[in-house]
Image (cartoon, rainbow, N blue to C red):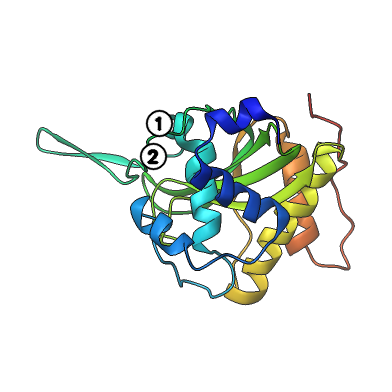
């Protein structure tokens, strides 16, 4: 890793990111780090989300967390927010720059009650990796608002890497949790709505139906 990057990342954050992007087994000492960062323990669907994935997302998304999905309501004169602000190590000086791929709405359970999820990609200087994250408007669905969902090499085609990681993420939910197809694409980013819908077809469409969408190269 580049020395300049090391100086901006505390050893604890470097260890967490290195463990995730290399796929190494988490050491027992990470439990103390997770507790200090208030990383929740999640068990909604075993094997889908680990505390390591949540910790990685908190580090990478810290500087943009106010622009991530948020549910809010008024109770009298009080503003109630569903997403809680998360912590980062006090010596974490390196601001990452997550870029939005697109966001979706899983379902609408009532007027003003959507279930949004936003996908972002963050380049890790010094690691030469990209990390993909998923963010929701609170911890109602998974027990956490943000978590990492995959890694790609700097040399990979970003759109193809995003397709593999996101369809794999959705497919795991469909197979392990009987998750139904999401309803709509709420916002475009590096990936446009048409392509996002085509990717959803790969996971949930009837295999005998023809795919009606054509992918486009939308990445900058």
Say which residue label 1 marks: 66
Left or right relative to 45: residue 156: right
Left or right relative to 124: residue 62: left
Say which residue label 2 marks: 70
Q: Quadrant of residue 220?
A: top right
State which quarter of the image contains the N terminus.
top right
Where does the image place residue 70, in percent across and percent down from the top left? 39, 39
Between disc 2 and disc 1, the foreground one is 1
Where does the image place residue 79, in percent across and percent down from the top left? 19, 35
Q: Quadrant of residue 200?
A: bottom right
Relative to 212, say whether 177 is above or below. Answer: below
Nearest to the observer: residue 115 or residue 38: 38
Nearest to the observer: residue 98 or residue 215: 98
Q: Secondary structure at mark 2?
A: loop
Where does the image place residue 150, in percent across and percent down from the top left? 69, 52
Q: Secondary structure at mark 1?
A: helix
> Around disc 2, counting alpha carbons within 10 Å, would you say few (fewer than 14), some (14 to 19), or many (20 or more)?
some
Where does the image place residue 211, in percent across and percent down from the top left? 87, 53
Q: How many marks?
A: 2
Tags 2 and 1 in contact by the CB under 8 Å rule? yes
Nearest to the observer: residue 76 or residue 83: 83
Q: Is residue 162 visible?
A: no
Gap in Å between the C-alphas at discs 2 and 1? 8 Å
């Amino acid at each position: 890793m580049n020395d300049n990057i090391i100086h901006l990342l505390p050893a604890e954050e470097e260890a967490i990111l290195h463990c995730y992007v290399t796929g190494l087994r988490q050491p027992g000492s990470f439990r103390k780090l997770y507790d200090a960062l208030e990383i929740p323990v999640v068990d909604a669907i075993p094997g889908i989300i680990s505390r390591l994935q949540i910790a990685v997302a908190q580090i990478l998304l810290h500087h943009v967390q106010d622009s991530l999905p948020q549910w809010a309501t008024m109770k009298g004169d009080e503003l109630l927010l569903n997403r809680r602000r998360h912590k980062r190590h006090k010596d974490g000086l390196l601001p990452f720059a997550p870029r939005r791929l697109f966001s979706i709405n899983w379902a609408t359970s009532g007027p003003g009650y959507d279930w949004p999820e936003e996908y972002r990609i963050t380049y890790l200087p010094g690691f030469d990796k990209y990390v993909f994250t998923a963010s929701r408007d609170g911890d109602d669905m998974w027990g956490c608002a943000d978590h990492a969902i995959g890694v790609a090499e700097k040399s990979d085609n970003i759109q193809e890497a995003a397709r593999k990681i996101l369809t794999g993420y959705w497919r795991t939910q469909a197979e392990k949790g009987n998750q139904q197809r999401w309803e709509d694409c709420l916002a475009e980013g590096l990936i446009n709505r048409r392509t996002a819908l085509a990717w959803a077809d790969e996971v949930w469409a009837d295999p005998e139906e023809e795919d009606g969408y054509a992918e486009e190269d939308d990445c900058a």
